[in-house]
Amino acid sequence: MAKEKKQEVDEEIEEVKESENDSIEKEAEDIDIPEISEVEELTNKFNEMEDKFLRARAEIANMSNRNKNEREQLVRYRSQDLGKKLLPAIDNLERALATEVTDDHGTSLKKGVEMVLESLTVALKEEGITEIEAEGKIFDPNLHQAVQTVPAEGDTKPETIVNVLQKGYQLHDRVLRPAMVIVAQ
Amino acid sequence: MAKEKKQEVDEEIEEVKESENDSIEKEAEDIDIPEISEVEELTNKFNEMEDKFLRARAEIANMSNRNKNEREQLVRYRSQDLGKKLLPAIDNLERALATEVTDDHGTSLKKGVEMVLESLTVALKEEGITEIEAEGKIFDPNLHQAVQTVPAEGDTKPETIVNVLQKGYQLHDRVLRPAMVIVAQ
């Protein structure tokens, strides 16, 4: 092979190599860049999904607690509405019992009413509904409603409840109606 | 360029191309195999996480429905316990009212008791507690309890309730206590 020819060949080879290199680089662009971005994309998708899952799991825990609390509140205060509606009936029974009776029939009727009142009070107590303590206690605006004040006499301290005009009732910590009271000042 | 020379050059070029191809394939092996397994691994991880997320989301929907139902049931039947306890009081008031009174005091007491009974019945009704229909109805073992049977007389069809010894009550569709009845046979 002549030197000149050899050089010519080498040049052509070099050209081909270069073009091949170009094509390799091109192929590398075609293959590698999408590969890397696919991994990145998948990693991002995974992270997003993991985030969604962790949020969902937190929501489940929150819902569970919230529902437990709601259920407990519903059970604890379930008798609020019916209990509240029974209070006027109890007032009326107490008022009826204040009636004086003179004959045996009346006495028998009164005895029956006393029993009914007792059974109502017991039923309410079992549901957590109790009378608010008032007479002789210090006035508490959360539990008592002052409808009248009188001057404090003798040993009576100011703000003491001296008379209860209508009984108050509470369901656990919740006031169904305040006691209507007269307060010494 | 002579034809012969041209062929020589082509052959050399072919060789170079092949060796370049080998190197491309080698490079591809070095790069691609870990890339593919990483993609696969990530895809699997993503699918698993997506599955966990979808299950969590389904659980949230289930919890939400379950809790809504539970809440509705708790509200619907909330007065069951207190209502049940009030029934003997109502029985006693009705029994007391059956007492004959002869004087004004007794009449006044009786009027008071009637009012109380009325207000109790209204309160129960508002909570969904109603008397079970019995007298003149066909006996239904889900609602009535037969304590006595009598022969059917005249137009009375068999299985008809001819007398109610104690009223029954239901809370919506739930029987608080069946009516105690006498049935014609």
Image: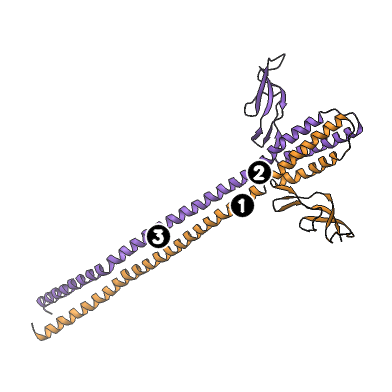
Chain colours: A orange, B purple
Point out the image quarter for the N terminus of chain B: bottom left
Quadrant of residue A149 in the image?
A: bottom right
Q: Residue at x 23, y 78 (%)?
A: A18
Residue B13 falls left or right of residue A139 = left
Query: Residue A110, percent across and down?
Result: 83, 35
Residue drawn 76% across and 33% down? B92
Q: Which mark is residue B89?
A: none
Near mark 3 (Cα within 10 A), the count class, few <14, some 14-19 or many ≥20, is many
Q: Quadrant of residue A2?
A: bottom left
Q: Residue at x 22, y 68 (%)?
A: B25
Q: Position of residue A104 (x, y in %)?
A: 86, 29
In depth, the one of A152 and B83 nearer the eye is: A152
- Residue at coordinates 75% horizontally, 34% vertically from top-left? B90
Looking at the image, which residue sits at the far bottom?
Answer: A3
Residue A175, percent across and down?
Answer: 74, 52
SS of the residue under disc 1:
helix
Question: Cα distance, mark 3 to mark 2?
Answer: 46 Å
Res. B46 mark: 3
Q: Are marks 1 and 3 on the same chain?
A: no
Q: CA distance from mark 1 to mark 3?
A: 36 Å
User: Which secondary structure lies at badge 2?
Assistant: loop
Tally of marks: 3
Which residue is the site of mark 1?
A: A70
> Do the dots labelled 3 and 2 sit on one chain?
yes
State the SS at label 3.
Answer: helix
Q: Position of residue B54 (x, y in %)?
A: 46, 54
Q: Residue furthest left?
A: A1
Residue kind at label 3, given as amino acid type? Phe
> Disc number at residue B78?
2
> Camera-side residue: B92 or A61?
B92
Task: Name above or below for residue A29 compared with residue B41.
Answer: below
